[in-house]
Every structure is written in C-alpha cells, then in structure tokens.
Image: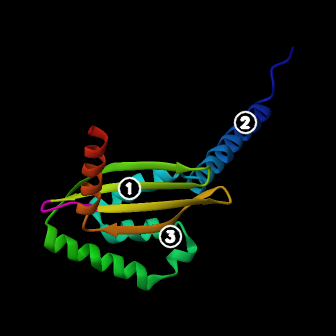
C-alpha cells in the first residue's frame, strides 16, 4: 500500500479544520439563539452588578416588541437609579420562585438586595419559535404584603 501524497494529507487536514470550524460556528450561533430563560436571567444579574442600564437593555432586547418601547425601558432605568440613591448599595440577589407553566412560560421571582431594604423583580418569559424572550417584567418595592400573606398562611396551617 502506497502512502498518501502530501497534497492529499494537507487537503484532508484543511477539510477537517473547515468542518470543525463550521460545527463550532453553528453551535455558537445556536447557543446564543436558544439560551434558556434561566441563562438569560443569570446573564441579566451578572450585568446588573456592573451596569444596571446595560442589564435592562440586554433583557428587553430578547423581545423585539419590548425593545422598541424605549420610553418604558427608560422609565424602569430611572426607577432603578432612584432606588440606588434611596436604598443604598446593591448587595446581591436571591431566587424566591422558579415556576414553569407548561413548556412555554416561565416565571422567576427574585429578591434583589439593597442596603436599606429589598426589592422584588418578577421576570415572565415566553418561548416563541424555539427562543425564550422576556414577556413581562415588574419591580415591586413594597414586599410587606407578600411577607404578611406568607405569615398568615403559615399561621393558618399551624392551627
């Protein structure tokens, strides 16, 4: 058996490199396109720690209809900026609720911790055309009602 000519070996190596590059490129594009709602929220909070405005731009860009409502996005950004001045420094976050409703709706509720008091962020995601997108977002400052309901529920179950 004769050894393959050098040209064929180079051709084979180039072919392997090309195939590998295409696979890597395709998986990267598919990975960005199909991020889970959990991954979107994790990326939001990673950005929120550094730049709240960029975090909101990112999460609202997952839904082209919400991204076009610049007035609402700017309102939320201004609200968060006001919270920074009245509530102190951002101290982190904690997931309170992770609810999957069917295969195409997810709701996440987070406690967003500031020095003075926490806020509640509610993310509602919808999966359309195999892509998760933010469907609704809400910030709640007064979480006392929730705490009171939990306490009342616990007391009723105790007796």
Q: Viewed as shown, does residue 29 lie left or right of 7?
A: left
Q: Which mark is residue 61?
A: 3
Q: Viewed as shown, does residue 18 lie left or right of 5?
A: left
Q: Callout 3 environment at 10 Å: few (<14), some (14 to 19), or many (20+)?
A: some
**Which numbered disc flags the more N-terminal residue, 2 or 1?**
2
131 up-or-down from 140: above or below: above
Q: Which mark is residue 109?
A: 1
* Residue to which mark 2 is pinned: 10
**Which numbered disc flags the more N-terminal residue, 3 or 1?**
3
Q: Viewed as shown, does residue 152 lie left or right of 6?
A: left
- Report the coloring of the rendering: rainbow
Image quadrant in which the N terminus is located? top right
Q: Is 118 covered by the magenta stretch?
A: yes
Please identify the dominant SS of the magenta region.
Answer: loop
Q: Position of residue 88 (x, y in %)?
A: 13, 66
Measure how far apart labels 3 and 1 are at the Cα level. Answer: 20 Å
Measure how far apart labels 2 and 1 are at the Cα level. Answer: 55 Å
Asked which secondary structure carries label 1, the reply is strand
Q: Position of residue 144 (x, y in %)?
A: 23, 61
* Stretch in magenta: 115-119
Residue at 34 percent across and 55 percent down: it is: 110
107 up-or-down from 61: above or below: above
Q: Callout 1 environment at 10 Å: few (<14), some (14 to 19), or many (20+)?
A: some
């Amino acid at each position: 058996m004769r050894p393959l000519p050098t040209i064929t070996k180079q051709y084979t190596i180039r072919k392997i490199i090309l195939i590998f590059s295409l696979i890597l490129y395709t998986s990267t594009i598919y990975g960005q396109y199909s991020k889970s709602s959990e991954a979107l929220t994790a990326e939001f909070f990673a950005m929120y720690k550094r730049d709240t405005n960029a975090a909101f731009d990112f999460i609202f860009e997952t839904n082209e209809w919400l991204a076009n409502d610049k007035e609402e996005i700017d309102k939320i950004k201004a609200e968060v900026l006001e919270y920074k001045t009245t509530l102190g420094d951002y101290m982190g976050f904690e997931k309170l609720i992770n609810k999957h409703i069917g295969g195409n709706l997810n709701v996440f509720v987070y406690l967003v911790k500031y020095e003075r008091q926490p806020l509640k962020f509610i993310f509602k995601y919808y999966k359309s055309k195999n892509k998760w997108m933010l469907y609704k977002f809400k910030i709640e400052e007064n979480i006392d009602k929730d705490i009171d309901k939990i306490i009342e529920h616990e007391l009723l179950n105790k007796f």
